[in-house]
Amino acid sequence: MDNSSLFSQEVLLYITFGLVLIVALLVLVVAFYVLQVMKTLLEKNRTEAQQLAEQAQPSWFAQQWMKWNALKPLADEETILLDHDFDGIQELDNHLPPWWKGLFYLTIVYAVVYILVFHVFESSPLQEEEYAIEMAEAAAEKAKRVEDVVYDFDETTVTVTTEPEAIASGMEFFNGNCAICHKADGGGLAGPNLTDEYWRNGGGMKNIYKVIKNGVQGTAMIPWESRLNPDQMRGLASYVLTLQGTNPPGALPPDGELYKEEEEQ
Ligand code: HEC
């Protein structure tokens, strides 16, 4: 995971989902209110008979709306009219909408649960503790990964491996990735002949490993370090060395300088 991101992807997913849900709910509520306002405006244009007919038989939806908002039908408005009057301005004693009160009670219940879980029984860690736990977990994971990739050699100390598996996978990689330039038999094409004792960058295990790892800057020989781990590069370099002296037909002429194996030790 990216070190710069504080949240795990899972948490980000939850946050995104929550936000989308909230926005969707808000859109719904706004749409609902707009519909309601339009309805009120339309109401004025309808005949009294139509209105009466509807009041006698309100739809299920209208009933729910009245119920959850604790609305009084216009006809019953006098029952909640407060008895003061200020220059003809009067006030209705409307209740808070039950849906709003329900939400409010829910927050109280939630607060109680929250206090019990986080502060009384401490069954879940608070944010600072949770952060510390996650950091410790990440550190442990990182330590494990670093352990995995500690190699006890680099290009200055690498030695030939004779492990058949390492050589075999080296050959496989060579045929799939290197043969286009060096030919499958190592005779050379766009890249030099790898079967003779003449090398542009020095022969022997350490030099070959170094060329595979770092490439040769400014040439078609790119670094392969990002594609292969040190073990794989060692197997590959060892495979390249097995091509020494095979003298394949049609090989490119010697290129570079004669390299003597003794020089390496
Ligand atoms: C796109 C072509 C290309 C590919 C693919 C390629 N090489 Fe090379 N390679 C070159 C060229 C060109 C050189 C010569 C660089 C120079 O001028 O020193 C070279 C040089 C080398 C050398 C050093 C030769 C010397 O004389 O010093 C080795 C070893 C080598 N390549 C191995 C490999 C291996 C192993 C692979 C596959 C992982 C590979 N190359 C893939 C083009 C390629």
Image: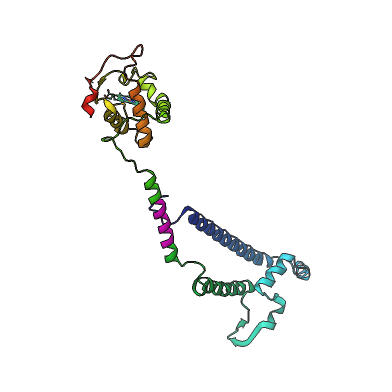
In the foreground, 32 or 248? 248
Find residue 230 and report its image quarter. Answer: top left
In the foreground, 209 or 215? 209
Find residue 171 and report its image quarter. Answer: top left
Q: Residue furthest bottom?
A: 84
- Residue drawn where x is 62% and y is 63% of the image: 32
Residue 133 highlighted magenta (yes or no): yes
- Residue drawn where x is 61% and y is 88% of the image: 84
Compared across the picture, whether 134 is left or right of 242 comes to right
Residue 140 highlighted magenta (yes or no): yes
Query: What colour-coding does the image apply?
Result: rainbow
In the foreground, 22 or 55? 22
Image quadrant in which the C terminus is located: top left
Find residue 52 and report its image quarter. Answer: bottom right
Magenta-colored span = 132-142
Compared across the picture, whether 13 is left or right of 153 comes to right
Residue 118: horizontal and vertical position, in percent? 50, 71
- Residue drawn where x is 70% and y is 68% of the image: 64
Main secondary structure type of the part rendered in magenta? helix
Taking 136 as reference, is 259 above or below it? above
Residue 16: horizontal and vertical position, in percent? 51, 56
Residue 46: horizontal and vertical position, in percent? 72, 65
Q: Specify the quarter for ligand 1.
A: top left
Residue 143: horizontal and vertical position, in percent? 38, 51
Total labels: the figure holds 0
